[in-house]
Amino acid sequence: MKRLLLVLLLAGCATPPAPESTTPIPAPEPAPPPVSVPAPPPASSRQENIAIAGLMESARADAAAGKLANAAASLERALRIEPRNPRLWHELARVRSRQGQHAQAENVAVRSNSFAGDDRALRAENWKLIAETRNARGDKEGARQALEQSNR
Amino acid sequence: MARRTKLRKFLRFAALATLLAVAGFTLYLDFRVRSEFEGRRFALPARIFARPLELHAGLRIGQADVVDELRQLGYREAPPEGESGWFSKNETGLTVALRPFVFWDGAQPAKRVQVSFDGAKVTAVRDVAGAELPLARLEPLMIGGIYPQGNEDRELVRLAEVPKEFVQALLAVEDRSFYKHHGFDPRALARAVRSLFSNRVQGGSTITQQLVKNFFLSSERTLQRKATELVMAILLEIHYDKDEILETYLNEIYFGQDRDRAIHGVGLAAQFYFGKNVQQLSLAESALLIGIIRGPTHYDPYRHAARTLERRNLVLREARDQGAINLEQYAQARAASLGVTRKTGMGTSQYPAFLQLVHRQLRRDYDEKDLRSEGLRIFTTLDPRVQDAAETALAKRLTQFDKDKRFGQPGLEGAVVVTDPPSGEIQALVGGRDPRYRGYNRALDAARPIGSLLKPAIYLTALSDPNKYTLLTPIDDGPFTWKSRGAPDWQPANYDKKFHGMVPLKTALAHSYNAAAARLGTDLGVDRVLDNVRRLGVERPLRPFASTLLGAVELSPYEVAQMYQTIASGGFRSPLRAIREVTTQEGKPLTRYPLAVEQAFAPEPIALLTYALQDVVREGTGQGMKNFVQPEVAVAGKTGTTDEQRDAWFAGFTGDRLAVVWVGYDDNRAARLSGSAAALPVWGDLMGALAPEPLAPQKPERIELVWIDPQSGLRGGTSCPGSQEVPFMQGSAPRDRAPCSGAMDAAVEAVGETVQKAKGFLERLFGR
């Protein structure tokens, strides 16, 4: 009975969690200082690079580890800082695609393109991703058109 | 002899019956103690947090604002030493000792950061070793909760987390023989019994008894209740060990009132009075809390500081006398001040209107019961800085209008919604002029005619057809009559009671000409326009009448914000969101409300419309904005005024925020205030206080900018006074040059085009 009460009290216990459960999810913060940034965002805003790069890196690490919700959360944090960074929107589109949210993936990729300016490489990547999501939804014709766009 | 036997028999029977009755009652109490005590889990409110402030190089925020936020979070300005929860100022900025916090995406340990500022900007965030950090995330401000019955609030703690001195001092004052007795203290009990007859209220309850009293019993003081309490205390002691009882006591005990919120348990008390976790309590602070237990109203450190200080020192003395603390500790603690944090007085919520929205969104996914008992942690999008600016702007202006107009009571009301366009996150929501009022939420529930706020949908519909309409297309603002069967003729008049003949499309919108908008809207087709209103995000059914085009449609400020969000974010619609994440109380993620976008309009017509909305502010009905916000911000917005000026609206956006303001009377009296006179100043005050980012919309690829002579509406240039660069869908710009335009202008333009072409060619050639 005492054990039961203890369990109940434990169950209701708020701060801080018991030692074995302090980190339910590895924290993306603090991120290690970005030594090598895989793909820096385009020239639009250099000043905030370090914050963006840090979040991008944790997003990539999370995505690689299959923690897609965390990856998306980091990208959304980054987008709050630089809402017009087409690279961030693109990465988010990739995560959405891996999450199986094909319609969102397409829309987010289109959003990325709306900020891509004359970054042709990124536009092509977005169109490729759109083609993939359309394929996944069984829209063969749409996929073909998207691929055509990506090769333009 | 026989009589004696009978008597004995009767006595024996009576004794047995009494025994049985007592045993039965005891069994019943035992059942109650066990079932209720064990079945009892403390109901914990859902806790609602604002957005966390994320500091990073380049963030546009000044040191004073960061300090404000830190103070709101209960950080103290302190010399740089010791535990977390303080900040100190230095030459380049601030050193902040961040508290640990469990965020949605994991635990963040306590850490120290150095934040440097340059004017209104963060220049760098570093760790103690001087290495630059990508980000420093402050813990979010708690802005309220969804509370269990009685608005009981508590933060559960384990006994092991409570400082030893706290426990020892507590026992020294409340129950010296706690670890020895069996639930009651015979001598104290005797005193208490005597006091019952002498009619003097007297303590003497053990901690176990106090717990029983709080858990199971009413507060009346009768002998029977006292006896029940005693039996239950003994039963509790039989079933549970001392530490369990003490731990439950520490979490149950009442420590005072924060408006309508009841502060229970030492964990929450530590936070409420000192802004600390229980582990961090100093001896003096512990003694103060222990002192409060006896009478939270009587010993209220905010209202009765002297009395409470005396009480604290008494606790310290007792602790010293009982040997719980030594002389040195005593002297040191006694010398300390009360040390309570500035009272923020939040009650169950600081921002009731926003909380109402959060609560409604949560109810789609969670049971009301769970929200009120499971201790969920709700991370929202509220930005306290923006919220405060919105509340202040609205209250200040309404007070001023009331004074100017003297239309009597009840006074003018208003509502404000502020969002972040690219994400649809709601940064602030004000439901009325008294932002603490927990009632009618005008931002969500006051559906009022939106007047001219609907016009952008008409012009958007037109601009979506670049072959027929450009920003310069002449629109007829002559008298207009709409006939439809079964309805009276509709003859919209203009605000200035004049008609303006043929005017360029952007001018018709800038000055909000009704006849022009009605003619254009009916030409395009009411259904087509309303279809676009729906695509902008309005979900309410719209009556397919021509009068709907001029805003005979009732929407709440929240719905208007949804509609304008789609324009502000380049034609991408995002559902407005107030919640980012929900976790369990331990921090385990439950639900995420992700960013979602959907392209509702092509970027080109949105870009043209945005330019036209900027013209509203540059030269139209929104001109007054220059008194509030620098012209460089290039605000895009629209005023709205309804019949007899019952409703005044302004909806608009800068480079970083969208806000919608409504002003009017609840009882629909004519306010005699136009959108530009009443709603615009609120909007201007609000945005002006937030250092808005200039609006420089992304130029879609297929949009070109052409210099236009305002007189002729043809291609102009440096030699045409007042020429403006106007956006056009490729190929839709006028071909002819204005008479004033000289050969020089044509040459400059030709060179520009050649350069563009060459650039395009080279880009194609080299892939970039």
Image (cartoon, coloured by chain):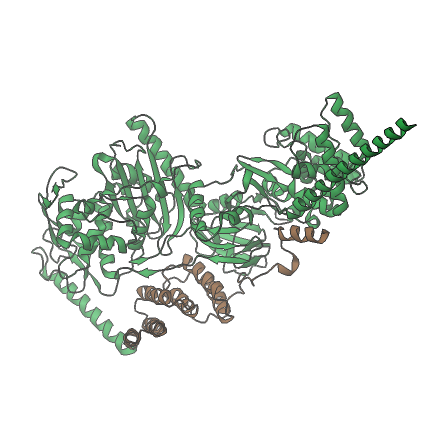
In front of the other: B534 or B505:
B534
* Residue lying at 45% horizontally and 59% vertically, measured from the top left: A77
- With B7 as the anchor, is B578 left or right in this view? left
Q: Which chain is brown?
A: A
Outermost residue, right direction?
B1
**In-image side of B101 versus B180 (left or right):** left
Q: Quadrant of residue B168?
A: top right
In front of the other: B375 or A58: B375
Q: Quadrant of the C terminus of chain B?
A: bottom left
At a point 43% along the width and 35% down the height, the residue shown is B437
Q: Where does the image place residue B672, in percent across and percent down from the top left?
A: 24, 32
Q: Residue furthest front?
A: B2
Horizontal and vertical percent position of residue B399: 35, 31
User: Where in the figure is residue B447, as x and y percent of width and height?
Assistant: 31, 42
Residue located 70% across and 28% down the image: B222
Q: Residue B175's image quarter? A: top right
Residue occupying the far top of the picture: B198
Give the answer, above or below, for where B151 lies relative to B757: above
Q: Foreground residue, B310 or B143? A: B143
Please tell me whether residue A28 is drawn above or below residue B366 in the rendered image.
below
Q: Which chain is green?
A: B
Assign the N terminus of chain B to one quadrant of the image: top right
Compared across the picture, whether B526 is left or right of A62 comes to: left
* Count of numbered circles on the image: 0
Residue B444 shows in this picture: yes
Q: Position of residue B554 (x, y in %)?
A: 27, 43
The answer to whether one can see residue B341 in this image is no
Quarter residue A49 falls in? bottom left
